[in-house]
Image: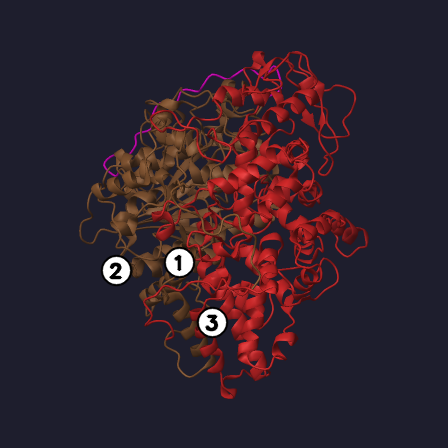
Chain colours: A brown, B red
């Protein structure tokens, strides 16, 4: 810990003074000095233009999607390497849906046969894939991996890898996600509202949690009402109850704690009213397949987007999760159904976005715990690292595969020994940070604010070329692929001991905001001195009356 | 609307009788006052000190034996997270050793592990065994707690001191620093140097001094190397550049980890240097167990630990913003219980609960006093106040897995090692504006603000999981005033404000026979409404 990173502590009075000077309105009064320090480091976002609206939708495939069967190589030699590694898990070449990405220089890929809807979206140029992406502290070679250098905490563990995908802080266990940090910055573009900018269809999660931003949780049928409450009921038990609740919450309390509780509960009830009235009357004619939670949840996302004007929002982040991907067993039986649910759900969403005219202003991206081993355990695959993902949207430069340019955008499995940590656990070619940077750039996080939203990015990956997910100006030309040198076999047991040594792929100094996110620099919140205040009754024993 | 015309802010009633004072004490010291618990204090002459001694003497209630017995009897076929949670519910809600349970629960929010982590949830009865460790140790010493937590195979898995390898220079690896960091930041000394009354020690410019450097984390990380499963193979296996690696062993989730010397770093370690530090530097060649013992002494005796831990425990039990003097009084007992012993948990707990700042009624009307009752504790209060019933015979204390997630808080289910909320969280509005803290408000947002009252509504009007309430005492009361007196005694310790009282009485008296739902009586309907409204009141939400 270095003291040079700690800004001097700020008294409450100074805080309030600075807050008003910096035009942090009282409605947005930050709750802690910590956030003030962050706020002072942030640059103002450009004011929104009229009609400006963008939504980012995270589709989280919980458990670790076997994405090497979702998107596989089909060029002859590469398919042979794939089939050899996967053994009984390999998708048959004649069944895979053929894709010819226009930036792979003729190399072909196959999509799992249960995803024809995604194939059509890819061919229509609306969907792109990102290959071999995962949590990284910096670009890593196999030798460095074997030396235990700069490894994410607890590689291959569900909980940690989920957190790291959602926080982009692979060095430590933190609970603030990059979707939440984006909302800390961008919610100022929205009208003041009790409904958070970040909305989850799948409960509370780290991805949407910011320093200030919280997650507004809804279900596929909308928001939850306060049971037994109806402000306009008359002459009924509900009316008696509701009047009393309103009375208690509308009262002025001398206790700061009671007043705060009354305020926050009132806001909770009003947030529900605000959300449900904004969505009332909004229906979709798009047919929603039954028994498909991805489709029904994404349909509610589309309805919420359709209510954007009434909600007064210009930016929203959504989170939808589908579980069941941890297929150590029964992969061949269960995986196709899950991929089909995803494919049909996503294409339903695309139709719904077409119906509401918002295809160009919404981007959906997939995420997951980690990739899975290439090798088979006989009945399934185990936890691994790098994975393939997809991004959908009218703004996406679709029909392409994005990834590590040096690997030709999609790793050639004939050379996978150079990035294989064992059992086909592939070292990611691109970091989640880089994936997130493209998404956030489109979403409107300015370069100046990127240090806050992705605190580790600039020092670790800032020197790397953007993936170009939204760059329609050029089709990424296929680079000449030079097979990386094959590292000699390990001479000793690999270790997953994390190391704090960094550098190697970065473009600048470590951001103080990153150290703050790690909790390794002083985040000073001074206790208020209460010395001037005489406590009543100190020293007296309880008086019975 | 009652009270809407009044410009005078509402304040709690502080004119309490002895039963109400007892109820107030039990709200701080237990998972909620039951009529029987109030009666017990009454018959003991309202002697709180003697009551604490009786609680300490009670046989502890443990959760792991409940799940292992259910498995042995064939009542369950496997021990999973749901079964462990039910067993913990049973000792928390149903245990007769209520002070012990409440203190253990408070400690579980300092020494955090989480069953949201699969290493914990997949560990058979491991999470219950960990919770039982806190139950067992909570009236011993802070040192005993820190030793047992450090050696716990569950904490080891949660914070990586389990199978933590010593540095291997040839491989360029170093020891995992996770536990070393958290044991300092969260379990003992905290981030900043503290005065004995819990204020920051600052430099002339007002900047607080940090209590440790990253180098010290690295040094402590070397201490916490070499721990592994208990029944290890005596034959060293695993190699690699001359390293004697951990043996393979049968996973152990319940017994303390054992030291495996081949992976313990035997180099010197530099610990904290402070006045009176007994072994600020550890010599080379000590055993791993000796290193850990010395390092824990170094942390327990550090001048920060007494005020840091005292403040956290006061926040869990009594008030979010204790005065400096209150922290100082408790902290002094932590340093010396009067017989020269440090870290005597009984002395600390008595100092917290018997302090004038906890007991004097004058604090009830102090606008900065008290705390938001935790959502889980609000639920247990409701259950215990009104003679909860459970259906089922095998691990019957089932609150429903969906409900557990809806509450925003559940024992041993924090999202991270940083607990459900930060001790210095400041909500927007009057608390934050006054520079005060209110940790529990960090989980009181627009979602839980609806979801938690809905759970209370469900319990009061029907059932919640396998739980329901027996309201026969309340429905037999002669009128709505007597009904509200009873609910006020049990939930709000008689502190319901005159205005809230009038608001609720108006609602109760306005219930007519025509409004009574099918299958209910007027008395039942009014009773349920009375309980729901008190539970929904700011008066109940804030423990004073």
As rendered, which of B12 and B104 lies closer to the eye? Answer: B12
Point out the tag, 1 or 2, that comes first from the N-terminus. Answer: 1
Q: Helix, strand or loop at disc 1?
A: helix
Label 3 and label 2: CA atoms lie apart by 42 Å
The residue identified by callout 3 is B501
* Relative vertical location of residue B482 with respect to residue A522 in this rendering, above or below: below
Chain ID, mark 2: A
Q: Helix, strand or loop at disc 2?
A: helix
* Relative vertical location of residue B128 with respect to residue B455 in this rendering, above or below: above
Q: Answer left or right for B305 relative to B89.
A: left
Task: Determine if the magenta segment contains residue A526.
Answer: no
Disc 1 crowd rating (10 Å Cα; few below 14, some 14-19, many 20+) is: many
Instruction: Judge whether residue A72 can be spotted in this image.
Output: no
Place of residue A341 in the rendered image (x, y in percent of width and height, measured from the top left):
48, 54
Residue most extreme to the right: B73
Q: Helix, strand or loop at disc 3?
A: helix
- Return the mark for residue A309: 2
- Return the mark for residue A264: 1
Place of residue B211 in the rendered image (x, y in percent of width and height, measured from the top left):
48, 26
- Residue A521: name its quadrant: top left
Disc 2 crowd rating (10 Å Cα; few below 14, some 14-19, many 20+) is: some
Tell us which disc is closer to us: 1 or 2: 1
């Amino acid at each position: 810990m270095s003291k040079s990173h700690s800004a001097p502590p700020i008294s409450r009075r100074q805080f309030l003074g600075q807050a008003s000077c910096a035009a942090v309105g009282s409605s947005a009064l930050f709750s802690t000095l910590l956030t003030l320090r962050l706020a002072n480091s942030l640059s103002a976002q450009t004011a929104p233009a009229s009609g400006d609206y963008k939504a980012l939708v995270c589709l989280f495939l919980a458990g670790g999607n076997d994405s090497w069967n979702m998107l596989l190589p089909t060029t002859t030699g590469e398919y042979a390497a794939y089939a050899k590694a996967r053994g009984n898990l390999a998708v048959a070449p004649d069944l895979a849906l053929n894709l010819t990405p226009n930036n792979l220089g003729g190399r072909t890929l196959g999509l799992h046969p249960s995803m024809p809807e995604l194939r059509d979206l890819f061919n229509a140029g609306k969907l792109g894939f990102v290959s071999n992406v995962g949590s990284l502290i910096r670009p890593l070679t196999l030798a460095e991996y074997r030396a235990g250098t700069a490894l994410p905490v607890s590689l291959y563990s569900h909980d940690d890898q989920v957190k790291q995908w959602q926080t982009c802080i692979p060095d430590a266990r933190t609970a603030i996600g990059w979707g939440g940090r984006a909302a800390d910055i961008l919610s100022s573009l929205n009208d003041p509202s009790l409904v958070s900018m970040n909305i989850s269809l799948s409960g509370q999660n780290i991805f949407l949690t910011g320093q200030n931003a919280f997650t507004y949780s809804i279900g596929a049928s909308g928001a939850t009402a306060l049971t037994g409450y109806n402000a306009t009921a008359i002459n009924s038990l509900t009316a008696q109850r509701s009047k009393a609740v309103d009375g208690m919450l509308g009262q002025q309390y001398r206790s700061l704690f009671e007043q705060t509780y009354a305020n926050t509960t009132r806001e909770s009830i009003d947030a529900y009213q605000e959300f449900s009235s904004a969505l009332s009357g909004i229906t979709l004619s798009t047919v929603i397949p039954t028994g498909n939670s991805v489709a029904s949840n994404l349909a509610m996302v589309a309805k919420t987007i359709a209510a954007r004007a009434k909600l007064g929002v210009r930016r929203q982040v959504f989170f939808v999760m589908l579980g069941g991907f941890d297929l150590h067993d029964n992969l061949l039986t269960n995986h196709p159904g899950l991929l089909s649910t995803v494919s049909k759900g996503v294409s339903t969403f695309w139709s719904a976005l077409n119906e509401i005219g918002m295809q160009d202003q919404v981007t959906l991206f997939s995420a997951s715990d980690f990739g899975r081993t290439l090798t088979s355990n006989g009945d399934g695959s185990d936890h691994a690292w790098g994975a393939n993902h997809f991004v959908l949207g009218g703004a996406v430069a679709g029909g392409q595969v994005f990834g590590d340019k040096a690997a030709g955008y999609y790793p050639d499995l004939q050379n996978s020994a150079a990035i294989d940590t064992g059992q086909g656990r592939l070292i990611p070619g691109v970091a989640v940070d880089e994936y997130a940077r493209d998404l956030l750039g489109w979403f409107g996080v300015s370069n100046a604010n990127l240090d806050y939203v992705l605190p580790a990015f600039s020092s670790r990956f800032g020197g790397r070329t953007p993936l170009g997910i939204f760059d329609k100006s050029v089709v990424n030309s296929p680079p000449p692929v030079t097979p990386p040198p094959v590292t000699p076999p390990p001479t000793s047991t690999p270790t997953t001991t994390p190391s704090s040594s960094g550098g190697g792929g970065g473009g600048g100094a470590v951001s103080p905001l990153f150290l703050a996110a790690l909790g390794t620099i002083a985040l000073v919140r001074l206790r208020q001195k209460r010395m001037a205040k005489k406590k009543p009754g100190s020293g007296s024993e309880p008086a019975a009356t | 609307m009652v009270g809407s015309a009044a410009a005078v802010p509402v304040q709690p009633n502080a004119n309490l009788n002895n039963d109400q004072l007892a109820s107030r004490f039990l709200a701080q010291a237990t998972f909620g006052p039951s009529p029987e618990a109030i009666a017990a204090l009454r018959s003991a002459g309202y002697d709180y000190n003697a009551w604490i001694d009786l609680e300490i003497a009670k046989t502890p209630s443990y959760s792991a034996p409940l799940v292992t017995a259910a498995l042995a009897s064939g009542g369950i076929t496997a021990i999973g997270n749901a079964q462990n949670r039910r067993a913990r519910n049973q000792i928390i809600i149903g245990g007769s050793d209520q002070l012990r349970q409440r203190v253990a629960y408070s400690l579980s929010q300092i020494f955090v592990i989480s069953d949201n982590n699969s290493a914990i949830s997949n560990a058979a009865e491991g999470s219950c065994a960990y919770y039982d460790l806190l139950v067992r140790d909570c009236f011993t010493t802070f040192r005993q707690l820190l030793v047992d937590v450090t050696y716990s195979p569950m904490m080891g898995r949660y914070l990586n001191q389990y199978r933590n390898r010593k540095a291997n220079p040839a491989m360029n690896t170093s020891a995992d620093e996770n536990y070393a960091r958290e044991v300092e930041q969260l379990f003992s000394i905290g981030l900043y140097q503290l005065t004995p009354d819990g204020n920051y020690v600052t430099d002339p410019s007002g900047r607080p001094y940090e209590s440790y450097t990253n180098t010290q984390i690295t040094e402590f990380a070397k201490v916490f190397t070499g721990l592994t499963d208990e029944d290890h193979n005596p034959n060293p296996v695993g190699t690699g550049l001359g390293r004697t690696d951990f043996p393979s062993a049968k996973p152990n989730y319940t017994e303390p980890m054992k030291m495996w010397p081949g992976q313990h770093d035997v180099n010197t370690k530099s610990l904290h240097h402070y006045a009176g530090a007994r072994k600020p530097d550890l010599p080379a060649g000590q055993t791993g167990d000796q290193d850990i013992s010395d390092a824990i002494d170094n942390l327990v005796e550090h001048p920060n630990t007494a005020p840091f831990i005292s403040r956290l425990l006061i926040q869990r039990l009594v008030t979010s913003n204790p005065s400096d003097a209150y922290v100082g009084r408790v902290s002094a007992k932590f340093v010396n219980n009067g017989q020269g012993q440090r870290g005597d948990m009984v002395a600390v707990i008595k100092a917290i609960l018997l302090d004038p700042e906890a007991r004097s009624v004058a604090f009830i009307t102090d606008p900065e006093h008290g705390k938001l009752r935790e959502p889980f504790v609000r639920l247990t209060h409701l259950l215990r106040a009104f003679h909860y019933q459970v259906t089922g015979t095998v691990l019957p204390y089932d609150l429903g897995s969906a409900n557990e997630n809806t509450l925003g808080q559940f024992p041993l289910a924090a999202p991270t090692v940083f607990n459900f909320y930060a001790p210095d969280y400041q909500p927007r509005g009057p608390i934050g504006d006054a520079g005060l803290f209110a940790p529990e408000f960090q989980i009181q947002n627009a979602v839980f603000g609806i979801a938690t009252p809905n759970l209370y509504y469900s319990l009061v009007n029907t059932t919640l999981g396998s739980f329901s309430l027996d309201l026969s005492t309340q429905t037999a009361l002669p009128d709505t005033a007597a009904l509200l007196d009873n609910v006020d005694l049990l939930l709000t310790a008689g502190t319901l404000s005159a205005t809230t009282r009038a608001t609720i009485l108006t609602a109760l008296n306005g219930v007519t026979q025509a409004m009574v739902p099918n299958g209910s009586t007027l008395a039942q309907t009014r009773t349920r409404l009375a309980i729901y409204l008190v539970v929904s009141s700011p008066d109940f939400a804030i423990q004073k």
